[in-house]
Every structure is written in C-alpha cells, then in structure tokens.
Amino acid sequence: MNELMANRPTEISPQVEVTPQREEHIDLHALLGVLNDHRKFILIGTALFFLASVLYVIMATPMYQASAMVQVEGASPGQANQPAAGQMVDLAGSRAVTEIPLLTSRSALGEAVENLDLDIQSQPQRFPLVGEFIAGRYSPEQPGAVAPPLLGLDRYGWGGEELDIPVFDVPQTLLGQPLVLVAGEQGRYTLLNEDDQVLLEGQVGQLVKGEGIAMKVDTLKANPGTHFDVVRNSHIGAVSRLAENIAAVERGEESGIIALTYQNTDPELAAKVLGQISTSYLRQSVQRNSAEAENRLEFVNEQLPKVRADLEEAQNALNAFQQRVGTVDISMQTEALLSQTVALNNSIQQLRVQQPDVARRFTPNHPAYQALQKQIGQLEAEKGALQARMSQLPDIQQGLYRLTRDVEVTNRTYTNLLDQAQQLDIARASAIGNVQVIDPPAVNVAQPVWPKPVPVIGGVTALGAMMLVAFVLTRQVLNRNVEDPEDIEQLGLPVYASIFLSSQERANALRPKKRHATRPNLLAFSAPSDLAMEALRGLRTSLHFARIEPKNNLLMIAGPSAGVGKTFVSSNLAVTIAQAGQRVLLIDADMRRGTLHEVMGTRWEDGLSELISGQIPLEGAVRRVLGTENLSFISRGKVPPNPSELLMHPDFAGLLHQLAPQYDLVIIDTPPVLAVTDAAVIGHHVGTTLLVVRFGMNQAREVALAKQRLEQNGVKVKGAIVNAVQRRSAGHYSYSYSYYDSRPTGT
C-alpha cells in the first residue's frame, strides 16, 4: 500500500459536513416516491383484489328482493258514525307509524311462518367453494330433472334438487340442531343426527314417527345418496329471523303509504312471504274494524231500552204539566232556547257514544282523548249558559221549557241511537280494513339485489388499493433502517461508497457451492461492468485519495451484524485494487464462520488459525488467487475453541507486522462487531477501519452502537460503506441509477 499512499497529499479528514437532524414533516414528493418504488407490489395486490371480487360476483349466490306497497287510510269506508270534521284531532299523520309495528308483528309474521313452513329449513349440501356456483347454473333438459353427480360425488347436490317437508316435529333438545337427511332409492330417505346416528327412516308421502320425531316429506327430488341439511327451528325463532329481514318504511312524510321489502335467495319464496304477510295484515285490519263496530253496537243496544224508558217518562210528565196549567204552547223565545238546548244535548250525546271507543284505544294523556274531553266540556259550558238564561223566564214557561226539552232531547237521542244501531249493524257485517294493497308482491328475477357487480368489484378493488397503499406508507413510516447516507453521516461517519444491489451477485450467491472449487466466484470476474463494481472502483479511488495518513497499510472491513455483505465488499474490493497493479493480501479473520474461501475458490484448511498457532509456516497459508496475479489469500483455517484469545496472542500481531511490508495493502475481513469482540481486537493493529452498512437492513442506532463499541476499545472508524443499495424514486440514489441505466447497450 506504500505506492497507494504515496500520491496522497498531507492527510486531512474528508470534508464531511454533519447535517443537523432533519425536521419531521410530511414530504409529499418522498411519499409519492415510496409509492412508485412499490408500484409492482401495489399493482399486483390490487389486481388480486380485483380478481377476488370478480370471482365473488360470479360465484356468490344471488339475492332477490320482493317488494310490495300498502296504503293506510284514516278510517275504513264502512265504519259508521265517524266524528265530524274538527270534532277530533287528525290522526292520519301518526297512523302509518302505528301500523308499521302491526305490519311486522308476530301475529302477522307468524301466519306466514306457519303457512309457508319457514320454521323448517332444508337445503342440499354443496361441494365446497364451487358447488353453489355449479348448481345455480344447472339448466335441466326436462322439468324436474336433477343434475347427475360430478366425479361420482353423489353426496353433494349439483342442481335441480328439491325437498318439501310440511311436517317436522322434533323434541325440544333438537330444536335448532342441524340434522342430515339422506336420499335413498325410490323415494326413501334416512334422517341422521350430527354423529351419523339413524333417527328415522321413511317414505315420501307418509307420516313417520320415532325417537320423539314426527316427519312427513311430500317432495324429494335428488340422486340417491344426496345429503340435505335440515333444521327445525322454534316458532318464535323463525318469526324473529323473518322480522329481521322484513323492511317496512313509510314513503313520504305522513303519506300513509308503506313500502315492504324482503330478500331471499329464492325469488318465488320471497314473493310468497310478502303475499302472506300482506294477506294476514289485511285480514287482521278487517277483524279489528269489525270488532270495533261490534263493541260500539253492543254499547248502543244497551242504551236503547234506557233511553226509550226515559222518553216515555218525559212525555208523561209533559202531558201532566200541560193539563194542570191549561196551556200547550210556549213562547218564541222559549222555543229558540229549546232548539239550542236540544242541539247541544245531541252533540254531547254523540261525543259520549264515541267516548268508550276512544278510551279503549288511547290513554287519558293521549291528545285524541284529551281533545274529546275538551269538546264535551265546551258543550257542557254552553248548555250551562242556556240554563242560566232560562232561569229568568216565568215559572210556567220554565216548567214547560224544561219538560219539553226533556222530551225533545230524549226523543232525538233515541232516534240517533236507532240510526247508529242500524249503521253499526251494517258496518259489522260489511266491515273492511283501513288498509289496501297498492302494489302486490313482485320480484325482478332478472336483476338480483346482491351481488351488484359494479359496486362490489369497484369497491373491493378500491379498498384493496387503499389498504395496500396504507400498508406501504405505514411500513415506510415505521421503518427505521438506513436508506439514506445522511442517516449515517449524522453519526459522524463519512460514507466512502454506496454499492448498488447486484442481480448478478444474487445469482452467484444462489449458485450451488462446489465442495472443492478451483476458481473464484466473484462479481469482479463474472460481471466487471456491473453497477456494484463501478461503486467498488469508486471506493478504490476514495481510498487512494483519502486524506488521513494511516499508521500502516492494514485495512479492516467490519460490520455491525451478520449478513451485511462484508465478504462481498472485501473480496471484490481486493480484486479491484489488485487489478489496478497493487499487491493485495486478503485475510479471512472470521475464524468462527468465515466463508471467504468459498468465493475465492479454495479450501478453508491451513489458514489463519493454524498460522497463528504455529502449526504451518507462512508459505503454507498464503495462496494465489486465480484470475489475478497481484492478489493473495489466507483462509480462516480450522475453527479454534478460543478465536478471541488466539487473536490477542502476540503471534497474531507479529504475523501482521511480518505481512505488511510484503504487500501494498492487506485487507482483513472480520466477524460482526456487535456479535463478538474479534473486530475490536483486530482493530488495534490496523491503520484503517471501514464499517459496512446494509441498505434497508441496519438501523442507524445499530450502526451508532457498533461505532461506539469499536471506539470504546480504541479503534477509530474512518468511514462507512453502504452496501446493497436499491433504487428509490425520490432520494439520494435516484440520479445514480438513472445515469447508469442510460448507458448504451453493450457497454
């Protein structure tokens, strides 16, 4: 190395400006660069999400939606004796809100469950993943045909299967438990439990009982051996599940129009369910109105005899008074007061007839009930005012007025009750509901509501892309590994070289190692124009023009951890310097796990450990490297039991003192600094120490700790080498790649 150092000026440390800590801020350019660096990962991942969504849309079981629409009216047209306008509060706005819970109540849904046997679930077992897709696309050549089993798998249904079970009663312990029905020959079947124990055997069309189970199968279309999953649910459980899938929404504010929807994989069943619910609800509405008319008729019939008796009594009292006073006429003023009083009593009587029905339907705090009471109170007040005016008339006129009033009021009340009785009797016999179906249940079979191809494929693809982008950015934020030379220079270490990751070197590393190789497996020989070799030549130039005068020509290549590429750097650097005409000796000082002998194409025996211990002479350890006449090599030798102690022996120092004058440069490859103390021991004898840091692998804290450990042992680290640098769209290495990648083909 004397000649290598001869052309250098007086040594001054390389001008390395230690930049201050970078401020933490969002660098949009850097984030876009990170996304561009991982674009293949993001694009491939997004494509996988796209394919997965397409497969889901193709293979998912379609879901169909049945829809219907009903209108809730304020009162049924056949309802008798409705209150006059303004006599009661308008309940049209709240009627739809009240009717929706009735529409989805257990009484309405329970009939649908019973009539359609929705508490009995049965479906054929399908082949995993693709069975439902194949069965859904089976088109029978003849009505009622069943698809033949594929590949002899008759256990599964492949399309066209049908099972109808109108009667299926099981013990309480089997409610909700999955059972298996196996189709047999000529309409026979077998019912099994989860443990494949036979519970029942039967024939289609026959009611079979046994083991506490009663079962009747009306229809069974399947290949012999096909398995069906059957479950008998509790009635309340089936109603609850149906209620969860029924949607009832009022269309428009206070419109009284309710839209019903129900989704199911069977479009025909979905329409039947809504049809049953609508029919049950209409019938219940008619029954409620008929019961209301019945209750009011009963009240009127109870009042008729009493009112008739009161009328006869009032007429007799009037006749007796007229005979006693000898007059039959009343004054015009008295007649006017009488007419007003009769009208008020008639209105009060009508409201009191409505009062029991309102009290039955509403609580005393309800606005409708309170409005009725308020109207009655107002009419009673007006009646009291008339009574006060009558007290100013003469006694005979007062008596005649009072008796005539009683007759007129009672007669009017009796007549009204007779009219109401006739109307209510007609209303009871011809009662209709206050609900009518505007749109009957219908299903658009050509357009299932799920899955919708565009939203599913677009949504899943977009979600996948966002997840991948978030993953890349999160990993970048959490990544603390060195990817920028500034991170190392901030530690006080000048970066002498950035060696690019070589695909050729990776291929060489993956090549099977020969036990007794005779030629070096080095990038300097196989691809001398590789970008990594260009960087090593730059390192050679940096060493040549380095401005620090070393105490000797010994160069130690160290690393904070294993796998950073010390062997690659030291071996190819040695070849590069040797090709420049310098005499170079390469020593594998990693006597524990050194692998330099493999890349140098020689054996590990008779190496450094034997040389230090005096087992072999120097001439037996130094070997020439094929391919270059200026490079020599000393392997690690046999693994000793105490490598550190062996390196601390005076013979090792004497060996280095003996070898240094014979070569221009002696390069020593050492074990990891943070793993063992060998590098610290060797560092005491060398003039220059370089630390190899692997791009994206070593953390800045790890590099600082390795530097600190060496310096604590008196070893000065001159600089760092960043190895296996990968291209980045934004950052220190983007220009270098762009420049080198622009070389003409063949250079």
Image (tube, grey):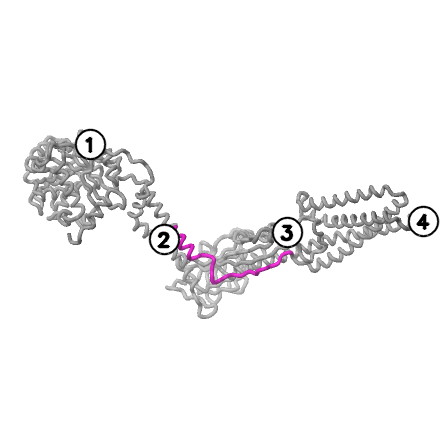
Asked if residue 599 lies in the magenta stretch, the reply is no
Q: Is residue 255 visible?
A: yes
Residue shown at the point (17%, 52%) measured from the top left: 744
Asked if residue 455 lies in the magenta stretch, the reply is yes
For label 2, the residue is 49
* Dot 4 or dot 3, earlier in sequence: 3
For the residues bearing labels 4 and 1, Cβ distance under 8 angstroms: no
Q: Marks 1 and 3, Cα distance to the nearest angstrom?
A: 90 Å
Range of residues picked out in magenta: 434-462
* Dot 1 or dot 2, earlier in sequence: 2
Three-letter amino acid code of the residue under disc 2: Phe
Residue shown at the point (20%, 50%) measured from the top left: 742
Residue shown at the point (75%, 55%) measured from the top left: 420
For label 1, the residue is 710
Q: Nearer the viewer, mark 4 or mark 2?
A: 4
In the displayed structure, 697 sits above or below 237; it is above
* Dot 1 or dot 3, earlier in sequence: 3
